Image: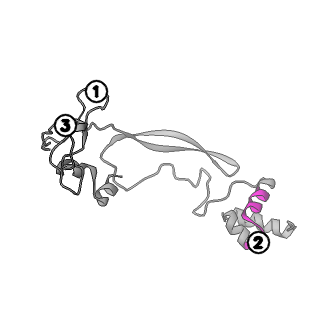
């Protein structure tokens, strides 16, 4: 495939209109996306125009306004920082508003009832005892829960709920 003057002019026009390399390759026919990208670089064409408008400072809004509610763990103060990013063959600097995050402290629920474990050693476990490990295995006070477990699970009811979470709760936590 040879790059004729006509095809090069069409490439330049489509590139300035903001079409992607794949779209340009499809319109030119007989040329791959990578060939279009290579030709664009050899011609030193400027960065592709955005489909939604230009990238000049005059057409870009000064500050971004969002109507979405903020998450509860963000501070009410907003920091502004300058970000440098490449667009095609040019580098743009723009100021971006960044919400500062506030670290939240974990407070365990006070109304949870934890069953009293029987503090069994590994050799004392049976098929009907809870095999939930408690503590550090390298420490002397390490033990297993040892409460009654049903035949369908190696854990007691309390530890079974901790070990096996329903799918919808796991998705909600992500």
Question: Which label number is shown at residue 110?
Answer: none
Quadrant housing the N terminus: bottom right
Q: Check disc 1 and report the residue beneath it.
A: 139
Nearest to the eye among marks 1 and 3: give it.
3
At x 51%, y 49%, the residue is 62
- Kindly report the distance in space between the C-alpha atoms of the residues bearing marks 1 and 3: 14 Å
Residue stretch in magenta: 27-40
User: Which corner quadrant of the image does residue 54 belong to?
Assistant: bottom right
Characterize the magenta stretch by its predominant secondary structure: helix
Tell me residue 136's x, y (percent).
29, 31
State how many labels appear: 3
Q: Around disc 2, counting alpha carbons within 10 Å, would you say few (fewer than 14), some (14 to 19), or many (20 or more)?
A: some
Residue 32 located left or right of residue 68: right
- Kindly report the distance in space between the C-alpha atoms of the residues bearing marks 2 and 3: 75 Å
Q: Which residue is at the front of the view, 105 or 41? A: 105
Tell me residue 155's x, y (percent).
22, 49
Tell me residue 25's x, y (percent).
73, 68
Question: Which label number is shown at residue 120?
Answer: 3
Q: Check disc 2 and report the residue beneath it.
A: 28
At x 23%, y 28%, the residue is 141
Q: Which residue is at the front of the view, 39 or 52? A: 39
Label 2 vs 3, first from the N-terminus: 2
């Amino acid at each position: 495939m040879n790059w004729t003057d006509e095809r090069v002019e069409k490439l330049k026009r489509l590139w300035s209109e903001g079409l992607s390399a794949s779209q340009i390759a499809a319109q030119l026919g007989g040329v791959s996306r990578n060939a279009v990208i290579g030709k664009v670089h050899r011609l030193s064409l400027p960065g592709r125009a955005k489909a939604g408008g230009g990238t000049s400072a005059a057409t870009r809004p000064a500050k971004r306004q969002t109507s979405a509610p903020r998450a509860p763990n963000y501070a009410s103060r907003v920091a502004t920082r300058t970000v440098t990013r490449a667009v095609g063959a040019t580098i743009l600097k723009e100021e971006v508003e960044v919400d500062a995050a506030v670290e939240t402290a974990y407070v365990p629920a006070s109304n949870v009832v934890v069953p009293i474990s029987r503090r069994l050693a590994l050799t004392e476990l049976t098929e009907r005892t809870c095999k939930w490990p408690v503590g550090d295995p390298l420490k002397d006070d390490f033990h297993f829960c040892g409460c009654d477990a049903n035949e369908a699970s190696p854990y007691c009811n309390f530890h079974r709920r901790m070990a096996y979470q329903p799918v919808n709760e796991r998705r909600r936590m992500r």
